């Protein structure tokens, strides 16, 4: 019974965090002058709500360290090298794919009068309203940690016995 009670309590806590995020998001949308002042609070709440995206890569990095610590020429990937690769290839390709998919979505599903104007309006709204950016930053940061784990493990696969 106590396990079920703990699960229900954890679920209620998650609902409260989600409600607080929703309330803060609505406040940020309703008050244009305060939108960017709420950015740090929204960011903290977003990271708190999406903590599992960091637990999995951290566990992966810990298992990498355990498996690879006995190898003589095991090298760790530096964060600077990861960020360079991320910003020179991953982010531009990801943005291009998202742009193409959004334009296809306009053509197939939404069919606005002017897809370019609709896309420009969405980009303008993204720059004005930080809520969408805040929701994507935790996943972006988790992707960096996951890439670090993959980059460290891949070259060592052939050396492990």
Image (cartoon, grey):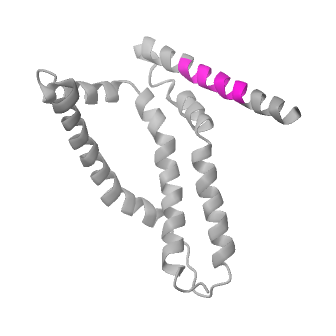
- Position of residue 119 in the picture relative to residue 58 (left or right): left
The residue furthest front is 1
The residue furthest right is 2
Identify the residue at image location x=74%, y=31%: 10
Q: How many marks?
A: 0
Picture coordinates of residue 141, whole percent (x, y):
50, 49
- Position of residue 126 in the picture relative to residue 17 (left or right): left
Q: Nearer the viewer, residue 92 or 103?
A: 103
Picture coordinates of residue 92, whole percent (x, y):
28, 52
Picture coordinates of residue 52, whole percent (x, y):
61, 45
Q: Main secondary structure of the magenta part?
A: helix
The magenta-colored residue range is: 11-22
Quarter of image, res 65: bottom right
Q: Quadrant of the C terminus?
A: bottom right
Q: Quadrant of the N terminus?
A: top right
**Does residue 143 sit above or below 108 in this rendering?**
below
Q: Nearer the viewer, residue 59 or 1?
A: 1
Is residue 132 one of those drawn in magenta? no
Identify the residue at image location x=53%, y=80%: 156
Q: Nearer the viewer, residue 101 or 35?
A: 101
């Amino acid at each position: 019974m106590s396990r079920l009670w703990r699960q229900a309590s954890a679920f209620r806590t998650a609902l409260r965090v989600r409600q607080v995020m929703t309330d803060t998001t609505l406040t940020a949308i309703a008050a244009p002058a305060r939108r960017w002042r709420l950015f740090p609070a929204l960011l903290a709440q977003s990271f708190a709500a999406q903590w599992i995206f960091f637990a999995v890569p951290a566990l992966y990095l810990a298992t990498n360290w355990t498996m690879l610590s006995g190898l003589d020429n095991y090298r760790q990937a530096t964060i600077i090298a990861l960020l360079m690769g991320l910003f020179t290839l991953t982010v531009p390709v990801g943005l291009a794919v998202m742009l193409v998919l959004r334009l296809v979505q306009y053509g197939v599903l939404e069919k606005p009068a002017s897809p370019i104007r609709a896309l420009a309006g969405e980009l303008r709204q993204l720059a004005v309203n930080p809520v969408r950016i805040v929701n994507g930053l935790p996943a972006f940061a988790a992707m960096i940690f996951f890439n670090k784990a993959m980059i460290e493990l891949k070259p060592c696969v052939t050396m492990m016995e």
